[in-house]
């Protein structure tokens, strides 16, 4: 299972990559592996304002639908249309294929997330 | 999952990288590599399923035929020895105890192949209704394993390990044959919409057979396939699943299985089903195709004209057709093909149209 350095991780198996005031959010390798073949991804509208823990969208495997939660609060400034068009990208490279980009409200919230080491322990 | 039952292939499933789930109290493989790849392998080449969780109930004795014919809705007097027949089994109110395959060895010996989730219930139900029938009923589920080899290349694969003339084994017929030196009961039947075989054998030989079939089928594109692909395959072919399209709340007539309900003979539940037919069905299982881009799932509500008219019994993005399709139990007045309905997905209505539930044309070799 792949866990990248330099990212923050949530208990719901999302990752967060911070770039300045923005953050990219996607699902982890552990998540895509647990889900199996992903065949559908529903992403939010741009400008949607989310609180940490809100549902940001849904990914569906062949078997079932699973909500994806937003690990930090803020306003969505970009969504990755490539993932909506071809959800299997989440299987082939979950870290390259982010789902949303969010303008972070409060960087202090990042402290609530896990480091790569903590996430590795969490998954095991 | 410590309390779950395991089939004799448990260790082999782990070896093949299976993701295990709880299915009907058994720890079963839902997929190995990928549901989509396993589904495709069955449609194009072949797939091998462990279905040892299914139950086998043996009915023997002078009144076997009379007894089973009273217990099930289909007319088993119409088949000869070495033939199998599909049939629902009903409660007296017409709802469904189970759907099963009746294997006829002779007038005095039958094997009922039943759903894993219903083994105990069926066994009890048979005993409860045994009355004065001169029969012995035995649950042999624990001793018998079952493999399903399914797909257009199934015969070619099986021919590599048997001298039996498989061309002579017709659809829904079965026979004992030697497979790689092991005596097996082989039926030309399955649950995928493709040609294929169901192989019954003693638990002690099933691991050898599994490995043998996969090794001789390797060059023909066989894959081990899990319950995930089994479900998407049967669903595309419009085949019902107990717990989805059939249940103790749904009658076979509502499920569209009228051709397996012979109202001209005596059976448990006949009166209720006859009444239901005469009064007209209030609800029916239909197929539907999504017009909006969203995937319907089991349990989602179905609406029409602003009111709830039923629920989705099975839904998927069809791996073969690449369309979002489903089956639903809805009020009959909305069941006409082409009718617009709404599927409620994450609290929002999505447009769909009623369609034939035979989404995929079956490729049985008859």
Image: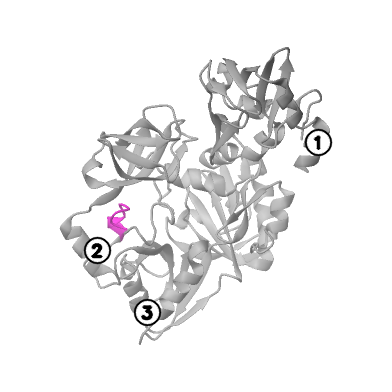
Residue B276 within the segment the image draws in magenta = no
Q: Secondary structure at mark 1?
A: helix
**As drawn, which residue projects farthest toward the right?**
A117
Q: Quadrant of residue B278?
A: bottom left
Rendered location of residue A53, percent (x, y): 61, 32
**Residue at figure coordinates x 33%, y 34% from the top left:** B342
**Residue at figure coordinates x 71%, y 46% from the top left:** B17
Rendered location of residue A85, percent (x, y): 53, 20
**Marks 2 and 3 in Cβ contact (< 8 Å):** no
Rendered location of residue B291, percent (x, y): 36, 28
How packed is label 1: few (under 14 Cα within 10 Å), some, or many (20 or more)?
few
The chain that hosts pointer 1 is A
Instruction: Say if B236 sits above or below B96 in the image.
Output: above
**As drawn, which residue projects farthest toward the left?**
B278
How packed is label 3: few (under 14 Cα within 10 Å), some, or many (20 or more)?
few
Q: Which mark is residue B273?
A: 2
Colour scheme of the picture: one colour
Q: Quadrant of residue B146?
A: bottom right
Q: Who is closer to the viewer here, B185 or A74?
A: A74
Please name the residue that numbered disc 1 is placed on. Answer: A118
Specify the segment rendered in magenta. B252-260
The chain that hosts pointer 3 is B
**Marks 2 and 1 in Cβ contact (< 8 Å):** no
**Residue at figure coordinates x 23%, y 39% from the top left:** B336
Badge 2 or badge 3: first in the primary sequence: 3
How packed is label 2: few (under 14 Cα within 10 Å), some, or many (20 or more)?
many
Q: Whole-Å distance between the Cαs marked 2 and 1?
A: 60 Å
Disc 3 versus disc 1: nearer the observer: 1
Q: Whole-Å distance between the Cαs marked 2 and 3?
A: 19 Å
Q: Which mark is residue B129?
A: 3
Residue B254 within the segment the image draws in magenta = yes
């Amino acid at each position: 299972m792949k866990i990248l350095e330099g990212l923050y991780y949530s208990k719901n198996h999302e990752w967060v990559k911070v770039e300045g005031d923005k953050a990219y959010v996607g699902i982890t390798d552990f998540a895509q592996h647990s889900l199996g073949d992903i065949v559908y991804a529903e992403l939010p509208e741009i400008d949607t304002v989310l609180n940490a823990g809100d549902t940001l969208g849904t990914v569906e495997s062949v078997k079932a639908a699973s909500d994806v939660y937003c690990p930090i609060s803020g306003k969505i400034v970009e969504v990755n249309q490539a993932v909506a068009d071809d959800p299997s990208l989440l299987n082939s490279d979950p870290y390259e294929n982010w789902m949303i980009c969010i303008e972070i409200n409060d960087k202090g919230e990042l402290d609530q997330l896990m480091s790569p080491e903590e996430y590795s322990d969490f998954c095991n | 999952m410590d309390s779950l039952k395991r089939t004799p292939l448990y260790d082999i499933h782990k070896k093949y990288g299976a993701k295990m789930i709880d299915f009907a109290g058994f720890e079963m493989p839902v997929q190995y590599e990928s549901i989509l790849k396993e589904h495709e392998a069955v449609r194009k080449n072949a797939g091998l399923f462990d279905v040892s969780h299914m139950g086998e109930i043996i009915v023997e004795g002078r009144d076997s035929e009379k007894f089973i014919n009273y217990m099930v809705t289909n007319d088993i007097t119409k088949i000869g020895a070495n033939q199998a027949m599909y049939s629902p089994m009903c409660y007296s109110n017409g709802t469904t105890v189970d759907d099963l395959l009746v294997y006829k060895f002779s007038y005095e010996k039958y094997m009922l192949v039943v759903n894993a989730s219903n083994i105990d219930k069926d066994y009890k139900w048979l005993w409860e209704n045994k009355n004065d029938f001169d029969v012995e009923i035995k649950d042999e589920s624990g001793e018998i394993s079952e493999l399903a080899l399914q797909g257009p290349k199934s015969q070619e694969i099986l021919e590599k390990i048997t001298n039996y003339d498989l061309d002579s084994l017709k659809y829904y017929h079965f026979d004992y044959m030697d497979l790689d030196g092991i005596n097996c009961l082989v039926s030309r039947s399955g649950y995928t919409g493709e040609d294929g075989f169901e192989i019954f054998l003693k638990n002690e030989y099933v691991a050898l057979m599994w490995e043998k079939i996969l090794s001789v089928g390797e060059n023909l594109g066989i894959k081990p396939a899990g319950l995930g692909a089994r479900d998407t395959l049967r669903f595309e072919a419009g085949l019902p699943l107990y717990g989805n399209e059939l249940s103790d709340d749904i009658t076979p007539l509502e499920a569209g299985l009228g051709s397996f309900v012979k109202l001209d003979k005596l059976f448990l539940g006949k009166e209720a089903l006859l009444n239901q037919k005469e009064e007209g069905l209030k609800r029916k299982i239909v197929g539907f195709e999504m017009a909006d881009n969203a995937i319907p799932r089991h349990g989602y509500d179905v609406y029409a004209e602003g009111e709830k008219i039923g629920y989705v019994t099975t839904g998927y993005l069809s791996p073969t057709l690449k369309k979002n399709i489903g089956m639903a139990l809805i009020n009959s007045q909305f069941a006409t093909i082409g009718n617009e309905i709404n599927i409620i997905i994450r609290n929002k209505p999505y447009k769909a149209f009623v369609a034939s539930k035979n989404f995929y044309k079956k490729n049985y070799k008859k």
